[in-house]
């Protein structure tokens, strides 16, 4: 005789509650506000700041000799000048596409290959080799600490300055905080349209930064914010905030 399976009240209750719990599962909560801080381009010099800091620490601890025959001090100086040169190239030119980035790295590879070739085979072009052998930059720890202090003070001034000029996105409005007296400008947010642009590949690699374009449907015009760090996260957060706003202001269906 076959046994009749008895219903399990707990299992039935679990199956009955499952669709309801799934239907009422909360979505990812939108942030209450989003801060948009455009920075000046000098923030992209932070690799040079780090290079000068590390060079100053090395020169202060190991104290390599500063003479034409010294190797460690020359290598430190060459590396620092290389990092500084790359930073200045990033500030001077825009690399909007990966093609330009590839060409840049190709040019750097060609230059480094030529330097290595003339170093290993000095008799290939004696004139070029003679110029390269005479390029032996030297600097002491005080020089690197001075560069670190100058850049550090500039970075500190930038961090203080941006606290008096930034944008705040809220569910119903866009606020512009500016001035030492905390001046405030309010713009409506429901008609806000957002566009993101990666204007420079190097700048995006350094700080994940880019350009945000805020457009309004009324007569408030367009606002362009350059050099906004972590631009993809900012865009996703604003999209969630505006999406939540659209759900909240949707009129109720009437039967």
Image (tube, helix red, strand yellow):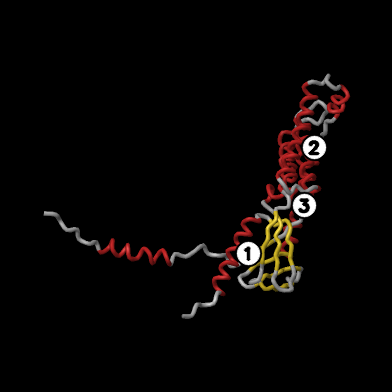
Q: Is residue 209 above or below residue 24?
A: above
Q: Are marks 3 and 1 in contact (CB under 8 Å)?
A: no
**Residue displayed at 63% across by 69% down:** 170
Front: mark 1 or 2: 1
For the residues labelled 2 and 3, the Cα–Cα distance comes to: 25 Å
Q: Is residue 125 above or below residue 61?
A: above
129 left or right of 52 in image: right
Would you name the residue on which mark 1 appears? 34
Crowding around mark 1 (Cα neighbors within 10 Å: few <14, some 14 to 19, many 20+) is some
Between 72 and 200, the residue placed more toward the observer is 200
Q: Which x, y percent locates residue 78?
A: 78, 35
Q: Are marks 1 and 2 in contact (CB under 8 Å)?
A: no
- Classify mark 1: helix, strand or loop: strand
Q: Is residue 94 above or below residue 185?
A: above
Q: Residue 140 bears which disc, if any? A: 2
Crowding around mark 3 (Cα neighbors within 10 Å: few <14, some 14 to 19, many 20+) is some
181 left or right of 173 in image: right
Crowding around mark 2 (Cα neighbors within 10 Å: few <14, some 14 to 19, many 20+) is some
| Residue 174 lies in quadrant | bottom right
For the residues labelled 3 and 1, the Cα–Cα distance comes to: 24 Å
- Classify mark 2: helix, strand or loop: loop
Q: Which x, y percent locates residue 106?
A: 74, 36
- From where the camera sits, is residue 161 visible? yes
- Hey, which residue is sitting farthest left in the picture? 1
Front: mark 2 or 3: 3
| Residue 234 lies in quadrant | bottom right
- Classify mark 3: helix, strand or loop: helix
For the residues labelled 1 and 2, the Cα–Cα distance comes to: 45 Å
Q: Residue 42 bears which disc, if any? A: 3
Q: Which x, y percent locates residue 101?
A: 73, 42
Q: Which x, y percent locates residue 186?
A: 70, 73
């Amino acid at each position: 005789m076959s046994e009749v399976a008895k219903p399990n009240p707990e299992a039935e209750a679990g199956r009955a509650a499952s669709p309801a719990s799934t239907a009422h599962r909360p979505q990812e909560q939108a942030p209450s506000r989003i801060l948009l801080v455009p920075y000046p381009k000098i923030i992209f010099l932070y690799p040079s700041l780090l290079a000068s800091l590390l060079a100053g620490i090395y020169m202060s601890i190991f104290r390599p000799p500063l003479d034409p025959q010294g190797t460690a001090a020359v290598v430190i100086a060459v590396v620092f000048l290389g990092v500084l040169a790359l930073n200045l190239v990033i500030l001077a030119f825009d690399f909007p596409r990966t093609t330009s980035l590839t060409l840049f790295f190709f040019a750097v590879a060609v230059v480094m290959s030529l330097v290595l070739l003339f170093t290993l085979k000095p008799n290939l072009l004696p004139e070029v080799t003679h110029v390269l052998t005479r390029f032996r930059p030297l600097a002491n720890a005080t020089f690197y600490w001075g560069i670190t202090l100058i850049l550090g003070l500039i970075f500190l001034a930038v961090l203080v300055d941006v606290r008096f000029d930034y944008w705040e996105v809220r569910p119903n409005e866009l606020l512009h905080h500016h001035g030492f007296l905390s001046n405030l400008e309010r713009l409506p947010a429901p008609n806000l349209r957002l566009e993101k642009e990666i204007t420079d590949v190097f700048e995006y690699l350094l700080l994940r930064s880019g350009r945000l374009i805020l457009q309004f449907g009324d007569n408030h015009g367009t606002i362009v914010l350059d050099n906004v760090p972590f631009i993809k996260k900012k865009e996703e957060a604003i999209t969630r905030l505006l999406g939540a706003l659209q759900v909240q202001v949707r009129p109720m269906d009437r039967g």
